[in-house]
Image: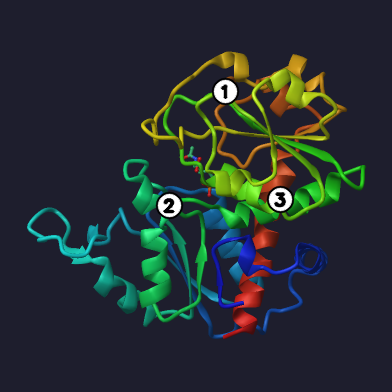
Amino acid sequence: MKKFTSVEDIGPLDKAVEEALEIKRNRFAWTDLGKNKTLLMLFFNSSLRTRLSTQKAAMNLGMNVMVLDVNQGAWKLETERGVIMDGDKAEHLLEAIPVMGSYCDIIGVRSFAGLVNKKADYEELVLNQFINYSGRPVFSMEAATRHPLQSFADLITIEEYKKKEKPKVVLSWAPHPKPLPQAVANSFAEWMAKTDYEFVITHPEGYELAPEFVGNATVEYDQHKAFMNADFIYAKNWSAFKDPNYGKVLSTDRSWTIDRSKMNLTDGAFFMHCLPVRRNMIVSDEVIESEKSIVIPEAANREISAQTVLKRLLESL
Ligand code: AN0
Ligand code: CP
């Protein structure tokens, strides 16, 4: 594997999950693979899980790890070409990228959608510059439109917990006070489309995701109806995708918050969320603390998805 930015890079999902579960059973079996290899993790945005789980995964493989928070201590970076750099940005990404590439063997990048320019976000301008100019294998630690390490961990988690061959999985929008990217939802939908699960997306009108990510999923505007007989509820907020409201919060309606009464409509569904989560906006205390909440094992599987991806990238160096 030469890069990892979407589900397309990972090949057949059954094989990927099988490999991930093998790694989970014996995560220190490949400590020589990463010897004298350096991972650079680059963050344009905050992170708890991605930062720690990916670093742990790299250490499990014997790699050296460097972490750079671009907004804390590094020069402010210009990302657009042609700009007269007389403002506060001291360095251009087009120099910074190959310089960083010269110090490492693999680069992980976190760069969220700006939520202002839809075209720039959906063309993945920042991530693609890393792919084009770093000279190194690049993987996404959440880019503008996708969060594939998260989706891979989500898939592993569903495979571990499912009680039916083809579970019903529901992606539910839930309210949040600030605009969030569509990346987690897009990516989850893209990975679910490659399984044989029954997959339903529910959200208020106006929150339709990009058609290429919705694919053949069922879209149900009635959240109660969507939850009927569900085996997994995957909660996430996202801001509007559709013009002219791209990147905007259209609703903070807490009647969409996931609470006990809604979970009671399901077939004893497990509750999932990528975290960080705002309690009593997205989900009630009661639901996230219930026996059916698998948010902690889901987060723990981020180490496994990252290790599987890093192992494959190392194997192709
Ligand atoms: C981010 C998002 O919604 O994309 C990261 C989630 C993993 N969430 C927040 O910024 C709260
Ligand atoms: N789920 C996830 O990616 O969390 P962080 O933003 O804390 O990395």
Q: Can residue 68 be seen here?
A: no
**Is 96 drawn above or below residue 256 in the view shown?**
below
Q: Position of residue 251 (x, y in %)?
A: 48, 20
Label 3 sits on residue = 193
Q: Amino acid at mark 2?
A: Tyr
Tell me where residue 11 sits by quadrant. Answer: bottom right
Q: CA distance from mark 1 to mark 3?
A: 21 Å
Disc 2 secondary structure class: helix
Q: Can residue 146 be seen here?
A: yes
Disc 1 secondary structure class: loop
Q: Residue at x 71, y 46 (%)?
A: 298
Q: Is mark 2 within 8 Å of ligand 1?
A: no
Q: CA distance from mark 1 to mark 2?
A: 22 Å
**Is 239 drawn above or below residue 96 in the view shown?**
above
Report the quarter where the N terminus lies: bottom right
Q: Residue at x 82, y 19 (%)?
A: 264
Mark 2 or mark 3, which is nearer the start of the sequence? 2
| Left or right placement of residue 79 versus residue 53 in this view | left
Tell me where residue 205 sits by quadrant. Answer: top right
Label 2 Cα crowd, 10 Å radius (few <14 / some 14-19 / many 20+): some
Q: Residue at x 63, y 65 (%)?
A: 8
Q: Amino acid at mark 1?
A: Pro
Q: Position of residue 6 (x, y in %)?
A: 58, 61
Q: Position of residue 186 (x, y in %)?
A: 57, 46
Label 1 sits on residue = 204
Q: CA distance from mark 3 to mark 2?
A: 19 Å
Label 2 sits on residue = 122
